[in-house]
Image: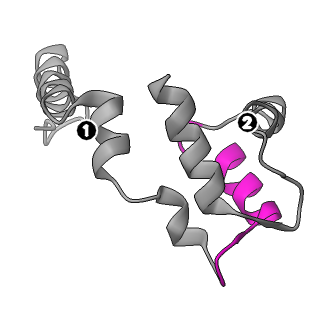
Amino acid sequence: MQSAHDGKMSKLEFTSIMSQRVNKFQSSGGVDGFFSKVENPFNVLAKNGTVNGRELKDVLTTLADKLSKAEYEQLFKITGVRGGDGPIDHNELYNKMVQILKS
């Protein structure tokens, strides 16, 4: 939907695309739907049943909707899961996050 001339998108095109994405997200159940349908997203980082703490911190604080370093630390305080640079039980972290979000 981009203009071939200037590489810009009109407001109408943008709102149309975003409306479609919001409708798709809402029809899939929103956040609750995501957590009830998607496997543990931390599985992509898992090796031998755990994720490397440094790698997890790097992913969560530098990619997409980044967490600040304080928010990353708070994640472990809230869930009660042991953090740090070593191995982290990603299944425990995910299950605690889901449990907290559903309460």
Check disc 2 and give the amino acid type. Answer: Leu
Q: Which mark is residue 26?
A: none
Q: Position of residue 101 (x, y in %)?
A: 50, 28
Alpha carbons under labels 2 and 1: distance apart: 39 Å
Q: Position of residue 92 (x, y in %)?
A: 64, 55
Residue in view at x 69 percent, y 72 percent: 50
In the displayed structure, does residue 76 sit left or right of residue 5? right
* Mark before the other along the chain sequence, 2 or 1: 1
**Residue annotated with mark 2:** 75
Specify the segment rendered in magenta. 48-65
Mark 2, Cα crowd under 10 Å, few <14 / some 14-19 / many 20+, is some
Q: Residue 63, can we see it?
A: no
Disc 2 is placed on an element classified as helix
Q: Position of residue 5 (x, y in %)?
A: 16, 38
Mark 1, Cα crowd under 10 Å, few <14 / some 14-19 / many 20+, is few
In the displayed structure, does residue 31 sit left or right of residue 103? left
Residue 59 highlighted magenta (yes or no): yes
Q: Nearer the viewer, residue 48 or 14?
A: 48
**Residue annotated with mark 1:** 7
Disc 1 is placed on an element classified as loop
In the displayed structure, does residue 11 sit left or right of residue 103? left
